[in-house]
Every structure is written in structure tokens, then in C-alpha cells.
Image (tube, helix red, strand yellow):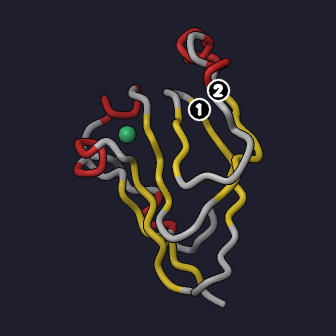
Amino acid sequence: MAGDNAEKKNSTPKSKTIWTKVHPIHVHGLQFQVIESSINSQFTAGYETVRYGYVDEGWKDTVMMMPGERIKVLLRFEDFTGIYVYHCHNLEHEDAGMMRNDQVRS
Ligand SMILES: [Cu+2]
């Protein structure tokens, strides 16, 4: 995701165990498209159990991310500049640090 808030993006979560869970990642204020995804080979077996149930095409405000998955998204910041929030919709993950800001400047 775009932005210049590298310090927050590189912070360490309070719990490392949440990274092995599924994460419904939500972006506030706009929709996006998933343009690329990949899975770490360590997590392929789990991903294969659900891969045909996933639909990456189309505009979204939330994307389900499997453990070990990386995605590249296309976001259109056209309505305003400022801080956009993105986070995991699992409340315990949000509370453990999976809520971040992305500063958008014109
Ligand atoms: Cu999560």
C-alpha cells in the first residue's frame, strides 16, 4: 500500500501468533483491486484448501488474506487527501496492532 508512514508499517505486532491466522483486511474510504497475490511456500498447503473459493477480481473494500499470503493492490485516492485507515476486521488482531494509517498527499 502506498504511503510514507514507514515507521508505523515496520512496527512489531504485540503478538506474533496472529500472523498465522486468516485476516480480512479492510481499507476505509475507498475501494481497491487485488492486482497480484502470492503465497509463501511454507503456507501453500493451507492456501490450497480455500484457493478456489477466493475471488480476487473486481472492486473491494475488504480482502481475505491467508497466512503467508502477500498481495499487491491498486487504490484510487481521488476524493480527498489525508489519512486513510486500513486494518484487520478481527477485533483481537486490530487491538494487537493490525490497524494502520496511510497518509495521502497531493
Ligand atoms: Cu487479522
Which numbered disc covers residue 91?
Answer: none
Name the residue carrying label 2. 39
Residue displayed at 38% across by 56% down: 11
Residue 57 occupies which quadrant of the picture? Answer: top right
Residue displayed at 29% across by 50% down: 94
Label 1 secondary element: strand
Residue 18 occupies which quadrant of the picture? Answer: top left
| Three-letter residue code for mark 1 | Glu
Within 10 Å of the Cα at label 1, are there few (<14), some (14-19), or many (20+) other Cα atoms? some
**Labels 2 & 1 near each other (Cβ < 8 A):** yes
Name the residue carrying label 1. 69
Q: Is residue 88 above or below residue 20?
A: below
The response on whether ligand 1 sits within 8 Å of label 1 is no
Left or right: 16 as drawn, with respect to 29: left
Residue displayed at 68% across by 53% down: 59
Residue 55 picture location, percent across and down: 67, 33
Residue displayed at 57% across by 86% down: 81
| Three-letter residue code for mark 2 | Ile
Q: How many marks?
A: 2
